[in-house]
Image (spheres, helix red, strand yellow):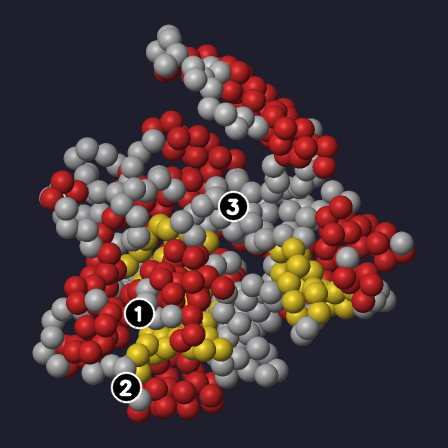
Amino acid sequence: MASPPPSKTINTIAPHFLTQLLTALSNLPNPTPDTQSLNTARAALTHNLPHDGIGLETTAQHLISLLPAFTRTTAHYYAFVTGSVTPAAYLADLLVSTVDANVQVHLPQDSLVTEVEDAALRLLCQLFRLDEEEWAGRAITTGATAGNVLGLACAREEILARRLRARGVEDGVGELGLLEACGRAGVSGVKVFSAMAHSSLLKAAAIVGIGRRNVVDIGRVDKPWEIDIARLGLELEKAGAEGVVCIIAVSIGEVNTGRFEGGMGEIRELVDEHGAWLHADAAFGIFARVLEEGEESGNGRLARGLELADSIVGDGHKILNVPYDCGFFFTRDPKVLSATFANAAPYLSSSASSDGIQSPLNIGLENSRRFRALPVYATLCAYGPNGYRDLLNRLIAHSRNIAAFIHGHESYELLNGPAEDIFMIVLFSARNDGLNDRLKKAINDTGKMYVSETMWEGRPAIRIAVANWLVESNEWEVVKEVLSELARS
């Protein structure tokens, strides 16, 4: 290992490295690397472990040389709903790597880290207009995929626990396992009803033992991202007769269209009537609640009814613009989380305290946890709800300007219009099949913007996902320029 002591070495090199890094980034305006940068960096990769190492200074220069080959979340990174990192979150993440805290056990006599995480989660509740006492089950996650695992696991635990308690059994799935719990509860299976569910929901269903085939799409014909209420009622009746317990998972911001579930009140009534669980995948849609509801036509109405869910998942690395990977999970009863995720190792016990903060390892997936909450805390402190409200309005205006241009262009078709209803996602295709088949590659090859492709009604379609705090009011002109040039050529 290098000498002098590592602390002195990093103190010497880090300031220079950071200056080099920021200078290099300023010379890389495009979201994706060009072919030459990729090939150069690829050729420079080390594939044979150096016996004595190459040293810190040489490694620092090597890292800078790889930077041009990475994607960068610039203002025109539209391939996924991925924000950049706000300055406050960036500084906080530097601190996270510096102190390298493992946020797993609540030890208030020894460290403040779990209290920072609790504060960050409470601030998120305030940002989203969710009562922090009512939503007492709260956790920082790695993202919405982990959040969906938590949601389905909590749902599975609670709906089966109700049946078990009715039969005099106090243990739940967390203790008995899914098969024994179902058998003792007189339950023949678990189903999830959804509409255009994100693929991570099916992954979560596989992980928690429900199974992908038991995730049933019951979307409306005219609005496939919304639950068909009439069919849901029939499916719940049928499930009840067959001894099947049910979870309803709604999309608050569907991944292809950005559209929202509009029938939360009716779904809640059916959930209560049939003893089901209502889970909301609101990875980016939850941020609509940052906006004031105002008039009926206001954007704040989009996520109306989210508070009726039993569990909610969101992503921090989307519109909150904190570093990858970060998400958050809310449910009403923290006991459901601990019943599923409790870790009983004596050496991981919490200190005695009266603050009500649970050890994160007892309410989430991981024992080993990075201090993801600090950038969340920092960015919320720095910008507050008004700052994020301004950001949301800027992103929505940017999305709608792009959508309006596409709608008015003879070569393109807007697929999730009208433009005035767009929230973050613009879905479109080229009318000409030849152009449409090569549209994603043609757009990305310009280097000016980066988009992703999906399928919509049997044809390839382009997603422009807007989430980056760097977006300015005139940025949409770049999109207009790229699409206009491709249509002409």
Q: Is residue 374 above or below residue 476?
A: above
Judged left or right of residue 47, residue 204 is: left
Q: Nearer the viewer, mark 1 or mark 3?
A: 1
* Closer to the camera in the image, 169 or 26: 169
> Which residue does the numbered mark 1 point to in the structure image?
155
Amino acid at the residue labelled 1: Ala
Q: Are marks 3 and 2 in contact (CB under 8 Å)?
A: no
Give the Cα separation between the discs numbered 1 and 2.
16 Å
| Front disc: 3 or 2 | 2
From the viewer's perspective, tell me whether residue 4 is left or right of residue 290.
left
Q: Residues within 10 Å of mark 3 (few under 14, many from 20)?
A: many
451 up-or-down from 13: above or below = below
Say which mark, if any, is on residue 243: 2
Could you tell me if residue 63 is visible in this image?
A: yes
Residue at 52%, 28% in the rendered image = 47
Mark closest to the chain's N terminus, 1 or 2: 1
Measure the C-alpha gap from mark 3 to mark 2. Answer: 44 Å
Which residue extends farthest top? 4
Task: Residue 131: tell me if it is visible.
Answer: no
Residue at left offset 31%, top offset 83%: 244
Q: Which three-letter amino acid code belongs to the residue tagged 3?
A: Asn
The amino acid beneath tag 2 is Gly
Extreme right residue here? Answer: 488
Residue under pointer 3: 321
The location of residue 273, given as percent across then percent down, is 32, 86
What secondary structure is marked by label 3? loop
Dot 1: what SS?
Answer: helix
For numbered disc 2, what is the local secondary structure?
loop
Residue at mark 1 to residue at mark 3: CA–CA distance: 29 Å
